Amino acid sequence: MELPTTQLLFDGAVTGLVIGLLAVGIVLVHRSTRVINFAVANMGLVGSALFALLTVRYNVPYWISLAIALLVGVLFGALVDLTVIRRLFAAPRVILLVATIGVAQLALTVVTSLPDLDDYPRESYPVPWSGSWSPVSDLTISGAQLSVLVTVPLVALGLSLFLGRTVLGRTVKAAADNPELARLQGISPKTVSTAVWAVAGLIGTLCLILVSAQNQSLTQITTLGPTTLLRALAAAVIARMTSFRVALLAGIALGLAQSFIQFNWLDQPGLTDMTIFVVVLAAVFFVSRGRDTESSSFSFAPKIKPVPDRLRGLWWVRQLERAPLVLLGLVAVVLPLLVAQPSRHLLYTVILGYAICAASITILTGWAGQLSLGQMAFAGLGALLAAALNRGLRLQVGGSVVELNALPFPAAVAIATVFTAALAAVVGAGALRVRGLLLAVSTFAFGIAAEQYLYRRDVFHDEGGNTASFPRSTVFGIDVTTQRAYYYLVLIVLVLVLLVVARLRRSGIGRTTIGVRDNPATAAAYTVAPTRVKLRAFALAGGIAGLGGSLLAGAVQNVPYADRYFLSPDSLLLVSIVVIGGLGSVTGPLLGSLWVIGLPSFFPDNDIVPLLTSSLGLLVLLLYFPGGLVQIGYSARDALLAWADSRLGTTPPAKSVSTVPPALTHTTRPPLPENTPVLETSDVRVRFGGRAAVDGVSLTVMPGEIVGLIGTNGAGKSTLMNAIGGFVPAAGTVTLLGRNVSTASPAARARGGVGRTFQAAALFPELTVRETVQIALEARGRTGLPSTALHLPHTFRAERAKRSNADDLIGFLGLGRYADAFIADLSTGTRRIVELAGLLALDAQVLCLDEPTAGVAQRETEAFGPLIQEIRRELGAAMLVIEHDMPLIMSISNRVYCLETGQIIASGAPDAVRNDPRVIASYLGTDERAIERSGKAPATPDPEDHHTPTDAVVPS
């Protein structure tokens, strides 16, 4: 390896400065609004094109044109916020990221509508200084490069001064550092967002002007491609999406690295992109570890209301969902028989192939909430591998050559599917500790690396050529050489894929995937391992993409990775297909593929169709029809079911179950040695930075006990409970049922017998009450992916049993009328009863309840005492309860601990703790009436009495 020449290093540094400035724009938007702006460069297209028009076509002086162009960039950024970002302000950040892709397409559409600059082929893009400068013999600095050297540091300094010295800048910084506090101080997040996007428009315009000046040609204004965007995203990720200085320096470093790699490995095209992909993976996994970039519920996934139980017996209701699909299937079967042209059969096959690939986005984004912008790369690699296996491989291993015989078409496709599933799990592993946004960056980087580097590997090409042929002959003895026959093969595969996806969605696989997306902490408390579920979603989506890519390649009998399919824009196209069809819907990929791929082919001369099917159409759909095309069908179905339900009269009251069914009572457990605590902590300490939230806490919970945990807000009660559950790193020892679980994960501790409720009682907003309880029932029996996908008979029996058990628990707690209601639509009190239903389903032995009556009216709080004692009796479990309602906690507790600043200041019987001077001074105060109110509630029944919950238990 050698160092590049001074000129190459300088050129790399100049390129890196522009990359760094783009990265600063990405960081600015993310710090303030938690959105990763994929339109950061394209937002400058309008201003940069206008700048060229003013100077070249209309002869406006350079500096006046520049001022106008920058002002237009600012206005464009503000307009994007007011019309798009503000309308989607409460949407998940993943959806906003998708919207920025539409914004990029919008900017490109605006630029193409401007007067054409091709009429001036001899004109160069305007620069402030002409000529060149050579400070040393082997270095030449052009006027365009000099403008970069002067402009970028000045802009970075100006941005720093703006954020630190101006009122608006300090407002932006305050809103980014502490949004809640800023809101309390009267700082409007929407105003901050508009200011930030306006500045982002200014940065994007300036960067495009600097880049276009270096390209010189007027016709290359719009050529800032995905590779430059990738480098800016990589620099932003290295900067943890927070530091402007690090982002700028990282951009320079990436520019220098590009020069170094290209100088030493000129014969390895795409190696720079592959290196940057590895850098992005490392940055996402290590630098951004533990950062949660997505916390809002995934409310844009179309909701389908369950069929009311009393309508399930009607034949036409049972066929209501199947009828449109059957009709669509009949059209798919008959149409190729009526249309004879093979070219049309090829088109139909391509539509089906894209629908299969899009089904992978349904699982990964619609269910798991992880946005992949490189899914067609998995499809492309699956196609290349299938083609290579189909013709036979020659691999050089060490000093010897290994030859693999050619495999039949089905075997090659099957192996390629498994390979892409494993590869997707590896790529996705880099974002396991974060949510959807950083996975989008990782997969985008992977897509560019695959396109520029992996696709070019000789192992994938025909011997002596640069293409990969994939001829088809027979599949299981059936001739598929004709386009019509192959179409029917792909149609059968699509039907099978959709059947599998639909089956998985109705099973524990789909429920736990959505549960981890909506609330990974609660999912872990229900024994579901978020990491395993995410990896499963990555692998499943990658495998389906590889399958679809292989079938697409088989349609044209080669892998056209150089001119169509499997490129970066195709990955964005897949996202458009799924969002337009219906995010998370099983039929969404097919509807979206018909819309995005089919409409332009069915109406080739229509000028409106390309706009409707582009990213611009995606943006319009997000703004006005966020549920996608399938939401229209859902709305019609729901209206029809509501009409049918109203015809049957008043809904009968839901039945309550008087006792817990035998199948759901606690399992037989080996007895603990006498006087052994079910839960014990020893010197547990939790620190956040330099502050000790929990400082040396030791407590015990004996079998059958209810132990209260009281203290002021900020005393460390919830943090201690998080340490017991494994949700925060902690020193010290946690012993559960005589076993040290200090190093176990939250899901492992839940499987060991800890049940946990949370103060917010958020649960899983986009699931129903029944589905939530069914997730908890996974603790009693896991849903197997292979057996469920294969529709094995025992999986249907297990699913029916889970549904029956969930309904029994729901009825026992008086939740029957809420069984099909979405958690997001319930009151706080009702959600807390659902939490208790989950604890019953878990069959936990130690229940940790964090303020079970928070947010519940006082008259309804009184019902919780008997209910908590009833659950304790039915499960035979011990309880650790955090509660601020003193009459309640003192009446149900056997013992009480009081915390202050992370330390126990008193413990013992309720009366003793209530009268402890330290507790009075710290928590209850010296008011005699407050102390008396903390006494035992007179109406609370004895814990050992049997009380049957009824509908009256459920808070309204």
Image (spheres, rainbow, N blue to C red):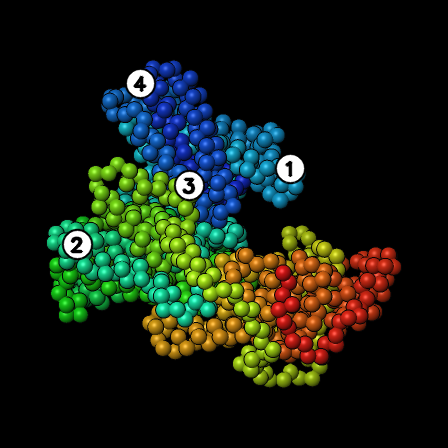
In what quadrant of the picture does the N terminus appear? top left
- Please name the amino acid that badge 4 sits on: Arg
Instruction: Determine the residue positioned at 42% across, 18% down.
Output: 63
Tell me if residue 140 comes above or below residue 665 in the rendering.
above
Report the residue marked by disc 2: 345
Please report whichever mark, 4 or 2, sits nearer to the chain's N-terminal start. 4
Please report whichever mark, 4 or 3, sits nearer to the chain's N-terminal start. 4
Q: Which mark is residue 186?
A: 1
- Residue 739 percent coordinates (x, y): 61, 76
- Spatial CA distance of label 4 from label 3 is 31 Å
Nearer the observer, 215 or 496: 496
- Which mark is nearer the camera, 1 or 4? 1
- Residue 355 percent coordinates (x, y): 29, 55
Please report whichever mark, 1 or 3, sits nearer to the chain's N-terminal start. 3
Please report whichever mark, 2 or 3, sits nearer to the chain's N-terminal start. 3
Callout 4: 10 Å neighbours few (<14), some, many (20+)? some
- Which mark is nearer the camera, 2 or 1? 2
- Spatial CA distance of label 4 from label 2 is 48 Å
Report the residue marked by disc 4: 57
Tell me if residue 426 comes above or below residue 266 in the rendering.
below
- Please name the amino acid that badge 3 sits on: Thr
Report the residue marked by disc 3: 100
Tell me if residue 693 comes above or below residue 707 in the rendering.
above
